[in-house]
Image (cartoon, grey):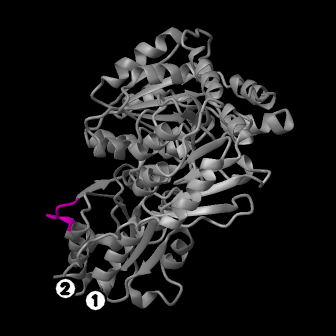
Amino acid sequence: MKAAELFVRCLENEGVEYIFGVPGEENLDLMEALEGADIRFITCRHEQGAAFMADVYGRLTGRAGVCLATLGPGATNLVTGVADANLDHAPLVAIAGQADSNRLHKESHQVLDLQRIFAPLCKHSFRVLTRFVIPEVVRKAFKLAQTEKTGACFIELPENIAKLEVEDRPLRASQPVPPEPPEVQIERAAALLSAARHPIVLAGNGVIRGGACRELAEFAERLHIPVANTFMAKGAIPFRHPSALGSVGLQATDYVNVGFHKADVIVCVGYDLVEYHPHLWHPTRDRTIIHVDATPAEVDAHYPVAVGVVGDLRKALPRLAERTRPHQGEHLRVLRHMLIEEMNQHARDTDWPVKPQKLIWDLRTAMDLQDIAICDVGAHKMWMARMFRAEHPNTCLISNGFASMGIAVPGAVAAKLVHPDRRVVAVTGDGGFLMNSQEIETATRLGLAFVILVWNDGGYGLIDWKQRSQFGHASHVKFGNPDFVRYIESFGGRGYRVERTEELLPILREALDQDCVTVVDCPVDYSENLKLTEKLGSLVSPL
């Protein structure tokens, strides 16, 4: 068989369901080998969209999403999505064709050193220079991508290597078992936590990746310790849980931050520094930090770990709870009540344009608790992170490590493929929407149905917010938009334009019931951004 066929058999051996990509001349043999394979190739309209689809597939399944491109510009178009997956710790394997290996030592048409380009963006970057290493390379790429902390790997396959004859077979696919947390560290952490007066938990995305959400909720319930989650850990503890404080990460003095100011012991569970830098929540460097994660802590001056409990979170949390004295847990309940009160006060708001708080209230009302929101990056992300109530893990996905715009629409494609029985909403600004809106055609061709909720302010709202906060004015952030209703209709979808606030909820409900891709174009009042900044800036601890 050809080396390309062996490569595809190795992918099948890893359980690959989908490959998202764009075919090209230098990956023709791989494309041919996929004919008849037990893998579905999803032809995308841009390689960045393909990478984002693989990214979100990895987040939702815990298995490496796979994207494919040709050499040169095809491969470089993958870069943003691959970097996003790696910094957000989503398992992903990117594959690119390459020119004949006899051309790689010199200047040649479309040739770039892809292995070196992707090396700083990935956990590992491979170049296949002999057909005999294919089983090892593929197995290692998937093993690394899927081992904590999960991330991206890249494989470059020159076209002449892909054509060679070879007799070999895939290696057995297996993943390392998370280590047992050391008993001595459990005991040390329990002693510190038992002696704490005002402990708080900071839950990161590693809780979701580690499948430890139930254990975290039971830990908080047993010990009566409040839990704040990062943007990427929404749903790691249900918002309805009495210990849940909501999301932290606005880089402002939000209610939850007041809890960190009060805390003497901070238990960081599955926390990644890329999610919310510790200098923002631990500027004083004087709190006791307990690090509970699958891997040792990153070195940071604002993250001085007193005790590290490294191992399987599903085992570490129950064992730590068993050895820790429960707390009263009442001192931070007032913060939770204040946030809930703020969420509820906009339920019947009729101001126009629609306030962000009302947009989120109606979206949450229209969606079932197991439905999935894929949140793009922009001002709306800050509001979604703060006010969208998530009761289950991976029901509100936010890119906040690399934080790349353009993820929502291709991410919704992947989410619908993974969970065809759930309704999916791509929550996006008008800026992020048009960055990868071409993938609406991909969704339509695949027969997928989901809603694209566009927060329309005619500009880059988050940058406008930052500029006004820092300089008192905005510049170079406004742009024009096409008619989004006619735009989605040109793809064969259905469009809605919200013209009164009272129309929003019924439109969302109707859109969610459609059997095609729909766009809900909703003008948003981002004057609320500065009001929030002013409010949080003057927030005084109620404790």
250 or 448, which is in the foreground?
250
Residue at 80% from the left image edge and 35% from the top image edge: 469
Magenta range: 34-39
Q: Considering only order in the chain, which callout, 2 or 1, is on the residue closer to the N terminus?
A: 1
82 shown above or below 228: below
Q: Residue furthest left?
A: 36
Q: Residues within 10 Å of mark 1 (few under 14, many from 20)?
A: some
Position in image of residue 276 (x %, y %): 64, 50
Tell me the CA gap for discs 1 and 2: 8 Å
For residue 182, side relative to residue 334 (left or right): left
Give the residue type that dot 2 points to: Asp
Q: Residues within 10 Å of mark 2 (few under 14, many from 20)?
A: some
Residue 35 highlighted magenta (yes or no): yes
Q: Secondary structure at mark 1?
A: helix
For residue 542, side relative to residue 268 (left or right): right
Q: Is residue 70 visible?
A: yes
Q: Which residue is mark 1?
A: 132
Q: Which residue is mark 2?
A: 168
Q: Residue furthest right?
A: 471
Position in image of residue 39 (x %, y %): 21, 60
Quadrant location of the N terminus in the rendered image: bottom left
For residue 255, side relative to residue 505 (left or right): right
447 or 206, which is in the foreground?
206
